[in-house]
Image (tube, grey):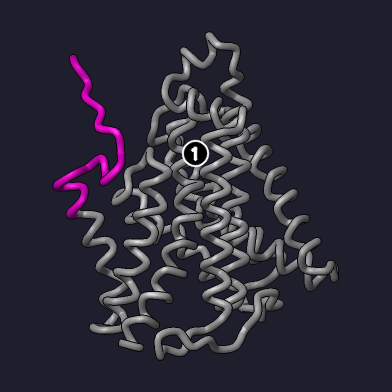
Amino acid sequence: MDTFVQFTLTGLTNGTILALVAMGFVLIYKASDVINFAQGELLLVGAYLTYAMVVDIGLFWPVGVLATLVVAVVLGILIERFVLRKMIGESIISVIMVTIGLSSVLRALVNSVWGTTGKAFPAFIPSGQVSILGAEVAADRLWATVIAVLMLAGFSLFFRHSKVGIAMRAVADDQQAALSMGISVKRIFAWAWSIAFVSAAIAGALVANIVGVSGELAGFGLRVFPVVILGGLDSIAGAIVGGILIGLLETYTGGYIGHGLNQVLPFVVLIVILMIRPYGLFGQEKIERV
């Protein structure tokens, strides 16, 4: 029982962080129909920016995290304005190749500034062990789960009730109708990239606090694809549910079976979902008449 509890809590931590990253991916797709292959690199940059603010510059960690989020907003706007906006009207393949190129550029910038050697991240979440139902669980993972859940709840409330969130949902549903109502679609695209960068930066800081900061953090980008396919490419609720399910699946498989199967099984799920329900658990089924 204690082993099951430990695996479950670990899976929930991984799942909520995956959900944070996936939410940014889904948001960009909903707003602009762009499949962002650079989402993992956004997480990587966010983690290193937090490291730079707290270690290199020496800011007190709440100030450092806040400064990181401000920089993430600015970078998100710049990426949308000078990279993606120029691709409006181009083919899907062209846009995908641009995001793949963007991921390579971001990774190269990180390596050139901070090097390729992993670094110890300045812990800002309480560590130690907590006993839950007889299982010893790392306190930093529990705190990371709580923070991720709060951030997901905050983003969900933002999308549902704020003026910008409502405008983003309107653009996602019908860009032409949103334009006729006076909504700036280009501004919404900038908001989407900024929020995606912020959510990835928060996830990067949480992951780095647990495992340290290194180039391997970009691997979360690939792990996001099974999440968004399972939940639905255009569903924020699906990103949350999909993240938790994939996180639990990875942890249970790695803990009970091992042999690296936990790295493979999410992609098996991805293939199965594409074959059975290609629009995901919560995605909107689109029927085109020709």
Q: Quadrant of residue 252?
A: bottom left
From the viewer's perspective, tell me whether residue 52 is left or right of residue 200. Answer: right
The magenta segment is 272-290
Instruction: State yes or no: residue 243 in magenta.
Output: no
Most distant residue in the front direction: 133
Residue 116 lies, in percent from the top left, at 61, 73
Q: Amino acid at mark 1?
A: Ile
Q: Locate residue 287, reporting x and y percent.
A: 21, 24
Closer to us: 89 or 269? 269
Percent x, y of residue 279: 26, 40
Q: Is residue 108 visible?
A: no
Examine the image and state in which quarter residue 283 appears.
Answer: top left
Image point (67%, 72%), residue name: 115
Q: Is residue 263 above or below residue 235?
A: below
Comparing 145 with 60, the one in front is: 145
Q: Residue furthest top?
A: 180
User: In front: 19, or 121?
Assistant: 19
- Give above or below for 129 relative to 201: below
Mark 1 Cα within 10 Å, few/some/many (few <14, many 20+)? Answer: many
Q: Which residue is mark 1?
A: 28
Residue 32, image x, y percentages? 48, 31
Q: Quadrant of the C terminus?
A: top left
The residue depicted at 55 percent of the width and 25 percent of the height is 167
Q: Residue at x 61, y 35 (%)?
A: 191
